[in-house]
Image: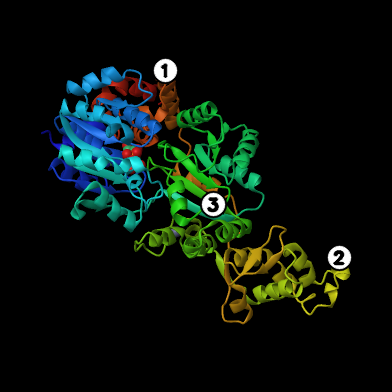
Amino acid sequence: MRDPLDILRETFGFAAFRGVQEQVVTRILEGQDALGVMPTGAGKSLCYQLPAVALEGTAIVISPLIALMEDQVRSASANGIRAAALTSASRDPGGTERALAEGELDLLYVAPERATTDRFGRLLEAARISLVAVDEAHCVSEWGHDFRPDYRLLRPLLDHLRLPRLALTATADRRTRADILDQLGIAPEGLVVSGFDRPNIRYHVVPRSGLPGQLRALLKAHDGAGIVYCPSRAKTEALAADLRETGRPAAAYHAGLDPHIRANNQEAFVRSEDMVMAATIAFGMGIDKPDVRFVAHAATPKSIEAYYQETGRAGRDGEPAEAWLFWGAEDFARARQRIETEVEPHRQQAERERLNALAAFVEAATCRRAILLRHFGEDPPETCGNCDNCLAPPKTLDVTVVAQKLLSAAFRTEMRFGVGYLKQVLSGDDNAKVRTNGHHRLSVFGIMEADELRLVQPVARALIARDALRADAYGGLSFGPGAKPILKGEQRVEIALPPKQSSGSKRRAREDHPPDPLFDALRAWRREEASEQGVPPYVIFHDSTLRQVAAMKPDSLAALRRVDGVGEKKLERYGEGLLGALKGAL
Ligand code: ADP
Ligand code: ZN
């Protein structure tokens, strides 16, 4: 067997393993099983692609989506790995089956429903197989967020083949991990978990105020591809139209779109270096695009788990990326209503706790990353230096008195009014409506000073997020379970006041990567290659590779070979072209 490090260098063009890759790969090469739990972008695919090259025979990879398989085949082939997929969309299934039988494939991707057919079993009997990898392995577990019954049928096949089995997932939850081991018959010592941090993602959480404007500013500061997650189908289309007006390519994606249009939009996004996709969460697992530069949420996600998974689609290539969450009190009000009316009673408490965790996250004045990682059971440092709260620490303010005044105003006006009106009463605004309602006679009329009035809006937002106030369908605010303890002075209320929003995100783009005409020239070369071959630019080289080339300015193929991401195959195919482009721009 060839030395794995040689394969790493020659086929993948990497100088060293990253994180737990080595541990996983070593187990498989030694004939043992493994379950690798690694965050998005950690390099899961290398964990089976490298053994697939090292070991005699074909590695079978079970994968849930055709789009994922196609993307993987494309990237593996670009590195000179002999890879194919057997799917309903395959152009030459007969040819692929023959190649399998004749030992001409390193990797074969197949969906679970096909893998478990008798026909496929017979194909395997006639071929030499090296290992079976199960990608997105959380699909096998009912605890996972994406259970697929077909995954359950894989076990007999795995037991029958008696080959190293490798399961891979980015899912974080302990119970799901144990279940995957159990379902796939992998011994507990095969579990390899890497840290969950995504250090290149910078988290920002801000209250929504004039979302279109906030998004336009975001787009202005970031010219790379991005996803904006929207709470509804209608919103995706409205936002896409709005964003297109900025001159940026933008499209919508949701489950209700015509399948043809949806597929086209996705394909355009995958190939683009600057497109923005306004999408519902239906735009998810199939998105293996490594150069997504930002993920924004136009409304709060369902839970911290969902948030982490969705934002995890940014910056898989390890280059700087951003996550922006624009939240509103309405999001929480709506989610709480949904729990009361739509969730089965025995699951309501758990759902409330999820929502409370999310509320604490958006309202926090401390490091966002630390909160996220603690949520997943890690013990991170107090500060990360790469989130909004670390970069510009907000002031925390004790607003208990303002909260009490606001709650009493709601109470004394019979909990029928919204924040705007309550503010009028609290400020002593002697207008016609207040007069007609007789609210100018209330004890809370005019009890707030200007500096308190400024805080009413953020305090209301905080109280709604914490379920101390509940908004009804007409905006009327009534008490939730958290109201009484605040009124009685048993519970204090603190909020975080972010420092004045500057053009912070704009500054960032420059700090990370100052404008570099050399890099731009290399990208232009890559764009041309990509369009000639009809593949996304990242299949040729990742941004990080081009940046290294721009920095190191290699003057020979031998020097170029030392750059991360330049394996033998790519060196042979693009080496001269890339050196030429570099020379032309120097
Ligand atoms: P995942 O499937 O875990 O999200 P990928 O397999 O797509 O991650 O890999 C993420 C990125 O990391 C890719 O750009 C890949 O080329 C890069 N990568 C993987 N392994 C290494 C390594 N050992 N050294 C440098 N870069 C790596
Ligand atoms: Zn931080």
Spatial CA distance of label 2 from label 1 is 68 Å
Look at 37% across and 63% down and name the residue there.
381
513 relative position to 450: left or right: left
Location of mark 3 (residue)? 325
For residue 56, above or below residue 232: above
One can see residue 566 in this view: no
Location of mark 1 (residue)? 532
Q: What is the secondary structure assignment of the residue under circle 2?
A: helix
The disc labelled 3 sits on which kind of residue? Leu
Sequence-wise, which precedes: disc 3 or disc 2? 3
The disc labelled 2 sits on which kind of residue? Lys
Location of mark 2 (residue)? 433
Look at 30% across and 44% down and name the residue there.
152
For residue 5, above or below residue 573: below
Label 2 residue near ligand 2, CB within 8 Å: no
For this orientation, the residue located farthest to the front is 118
- The picture quadrant where one finds residue 11 is top left
- Point out residue 40 in the picture as x, y percentages from the top left corner: 37, 45
- Point out residue 68 in the picture as x, y percentages from the top left corner: 37, 34
- Point out residue 336 in the picture as x, y percentages from the top left corner: 58, 60
Mark 3 against mark 2, which lies toward the viewer? 2
Query: 50 and 132: which one is in front?
Result: 132
Spatial CA distance of label 3 from label 2 is 36 Å
For residue 318, above or below residue 540: below
Spatial CA distance of label 3 from label 1 is 37 Å
Sequence-wise, which precedes: disc 3 or disc 1? 3
